[in-house]
Amino acid sequence: MNLPSRITTDELDNMFQTATYVERHLPGVNMKNLKTEMFLLIEKLYGISKTKDCYPDDKKPIKIRLNADQIAIYEFCLLLLLKANEKDRDIIQIRNFPHKRSFRQMKRFFLPDSHEKIRQNYYQAMSRLVSLYHTKGKKYFFK
């Protein structure tokens, strides 16, 4: 993916939404010794699947595959968060990871503040990240 040389706070917010989606659908770590061969054999013979309520002939869940642009946006957002200061990083991570939260839901994390104050702090943190990206350039983030 070719990152634009100039981005706005709305574009960066959309990138973080994409990064949230990617993180949710990334494959997990493979555990080689997760199941013994006996359980795999029982599943093949009797057709009992992971949910134990359905058989393999039933509908299988759709396997979602991420494209290269989505993974590149995810990497860029992680690198951008690494360069942010701690306060900005906290508010952006709480808003976007592991799923997108509304400002009213974020009130629990920042109790004395109202949701409007949290929204202002969030967009100020985003604008600081955008200005950091514009002043330092792409090469600063991909070192």
Image (cartoon, rainbow, N blue to C red):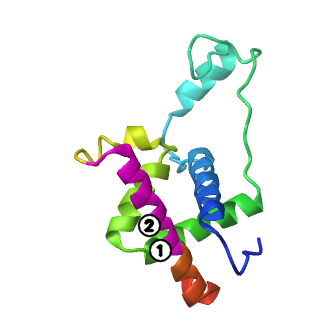
Residue 125 appearing in the image = yes
The type of residue carrying mark 2 is Ala
What percent of the width, then of the height, locates residue 3? 72, 75
Q: Give me the residue at 72% from left, 41% from top.
A: 64
The residue that label 1 is drawn on is 128
What percent of the width, then of the height, locates residue 105? 39, 38
Q: Is residue 139 above or below residue 119?
A: below
SS at mark 1 in the image: helix
The type of residue carrying mark 1 is Arg
Q: Which residues are magenta?
A: 113-129
The residue that label 2 is drawn on is 125
Dot 1, crowdedness within 10 Å: few (<14), some or many (≥20)? some
Along the horizontal axis of the image, is 50 left or right of 56? left
Q: Does the magenta run of residues contain 28?
A: no
Residue 142 appearing in the image = no
**Looking at the image, which is closer to me, 27 or 101?**
101
**Looking at the image, which is closer to me, 5 or 93?**
5
Q: Give me the residue at 61% from left, 89% from top.
A: 139
Q: Give the main secondary structure, helix, strand or loop, of the magenta stretch.
A: helix
Q: Give me the residue at 60% from left, 70% from top.
A: 76
What percent of the width, then of the height, locates residue 35? 50, 34
Q: Does the magenta run of residues contain 127?
A: yes
Q: Is residue 75 above or below residue 140?
A: above
Q: Give me the residue at 38% from left, 44% from top.
A: 115
What percent of the width, then of the height, locates residue 32? 53, 47
The N terminus appears in which quarter of the rendering? bottom right
**Looking at the image, which is closer to me, 76 or 114?**
114
Q: Which mark is residue 47?
A: none
SS at mark 2 in the image: helix
Q: Quadrant of residue 39?
A: top right
